[in-house]
Image (cartoon, coloured by chain):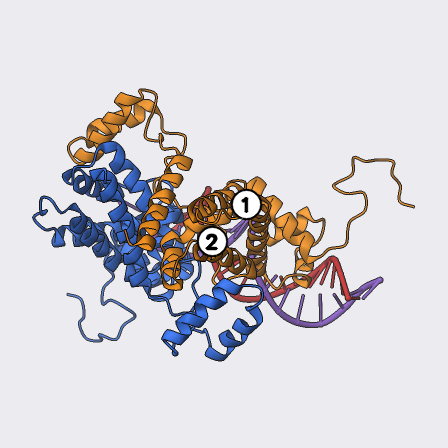
Chain colours: A blue, B orange, C red, D purple
Amino acid sequence: MPDMATQTEPSRERRAPLSRERVLETAVAIADESGIDSLTMRHLAEALGVEAMSLYYHVANKEAVLDGIADVIVDEINQAVSRVDQPTAEDDWKVAMRTRILTAREVLLEHRWAPEVMESRTNVSPGVIRYFDGLLGIFRGGGFSYDLAHHALHALGSRALGFTQELFEPEDDAGDEESMEMLEQMAGQFPHLVGMLAEVVHDDPDSTLGWCDDQVEFEFGLDLILDGLDRLRTGT
Amino acid sequence: MPDMATQTEPSRERRAPLSRERVLETAVAIADESGIDSLTMRHLAEALGVEAMSLYYHVANKEAVLDGIADVIVDEINQAVSRVDQPTAEDDWKVAMRTRILTAREVLLEHRWAPEVMESRTNVSPGVIRYFDGLLGIFRGGGFSYDLAHHALHALGSRALGFTQELFEPEDDAGDEESMEMLEQMAGQFPHLVGMLAEVVHDDPDSTLGWCDDQVEFEFGLDLILDGLDRLRTGT
DNA sequence: ACCTGAACACCGTTCAAGT
DNA sequence: ACCTGAACACCGTTCAAGT
């Protein structure tokens, strides 16, 4: 019988045996809490109360860990998606697609490291095949030809999974004074950008360079594409 | 007078002095030839015929090198773009935008590592600001409000710079037999995907999972977005 | 002003060895 | 079957020292 006396021990009263599942689960936790860069084999082992070399009995190498945690997230997406799944309202493929993609996005927003890792995977996991098969199903249900559905998936790209990699990521350190100062310097060189920012500032004096609402922009882009596809579908 | 006798020396007859420019130039060459992973401070130094620590006199650290080579590529894009620049055919903003983006894409196709590096940069360089200011100019010339132009840039995302990160990158090792085998196994689980692939194979018996034409798909997605934006602009 | 040697704190990974 | 110690070949980076 294990002693239940001192609960204040390192992490767990009696180490659960190491396993691929426990390794990946812990890896996800580390990435969630401290970012993907601090997910090293040595940290991972330490968090599991084990030596780094022990991991290699359960996973081939670090690439396999990254493959694994990408899978974990995709599975989470597939579960979330199947939970939300509506009775597929016949005609309206667009709302089905929209809600499915935004559901995937919700999952990814809890794992900010995931997009980067997923993009860096070369071989596709059964999980993402499964997800894309589902999207294809929605397109087909909406009357898309296979050919158009195929183009559609490419047009969506990573948006299909709920994310876009932002090129401008102004951080939240965009100090008002600093950016306004920069703005004045740029006025000559970048007239259109400065004009745009001036209007934004006029409309909302509190906003700065970091004013963009990612969720709003994501949905704008998504709807733009879905509407365009619907037009191609109906030949409008 | 330096001896011009033996031209078969290591790299250059007399080392040009080290400089930030030479460091970045060489870094780009290494990334082009051997991929971004083999761009290490030590390799970089070796290629320059110098010790690794000498680099730190000209660049702050490795992040600064990555910032730097991203800049080099963006500058190359800006140059290419300004070379192609048409007299901005008044009404037709779409062709101006299209050719500009496809020009940027041509540059990126010569530096396959660049998209990844550019996405990983957090602070925006003057070069990309300059590029986006140009795009904004085209939108404005086409009669876009600042607000719509702003949404438009977000909707384009990385496409604005000429690339999309493909989620499926089937490599070119997609052996015919292997994929056909896999196809049969998947038939039950992934009906829509298998259906689509069956049709593709029927239309073009030589094609496999790696049949997608990246350029075609890029242009499809781009035109879909540009057409959508044009509709929003004219309120159609 | 520019470059270097030696050293540090980290990586991922192998391999023979322990239980 | 599962885990480990010692070691290897690599990272980026520092700091005091050379010219």
> Would you say residue A57 is visible in this rendering?
no
Q: Is residue A83 left or right of residue A150?
A: left
Marks 2 & 1 on one chain:
yes
Residue B165 in the image: state x and y as whole percent.
Answer: 40, 46
**In the rendered view, would you say A171 is above or below B141?**
below
Residue at 61%, 54% in the rendered image: B41
Mark 1 residue type: Gln
How busy is the neighbourhood of tag 1: few (under 14 within 10 Å), some, or many (20 plus)? few
Residue B197 in the image: state x and y as whole percent.
Answer: 25, 29
Q: Is residue A126 left or right of residue B139?
A: left
Residue A87 in the image: state x and y as whole percent.
Answer: 7, 48
For label 1, the SS is loop
- Which residue has dot 1 on it? B86
The foreground one among D8 and B40 is: B40
**In the rendered view, would you say A132 is above or below C2?**
above
Mark 2 residue type: Ile
The tally of labels here is 2
For marks 2 and 1 on the same chain, the one whose residue lies earlier in the sequence: 1
How busy is the neighbourhood of tag 2: few (under 14 within 10 Å), some, or many (20 plus)? many
The subunit carrying tag 2 is B
Circles 2 and 1: CB atoms closer than 8 Å? no
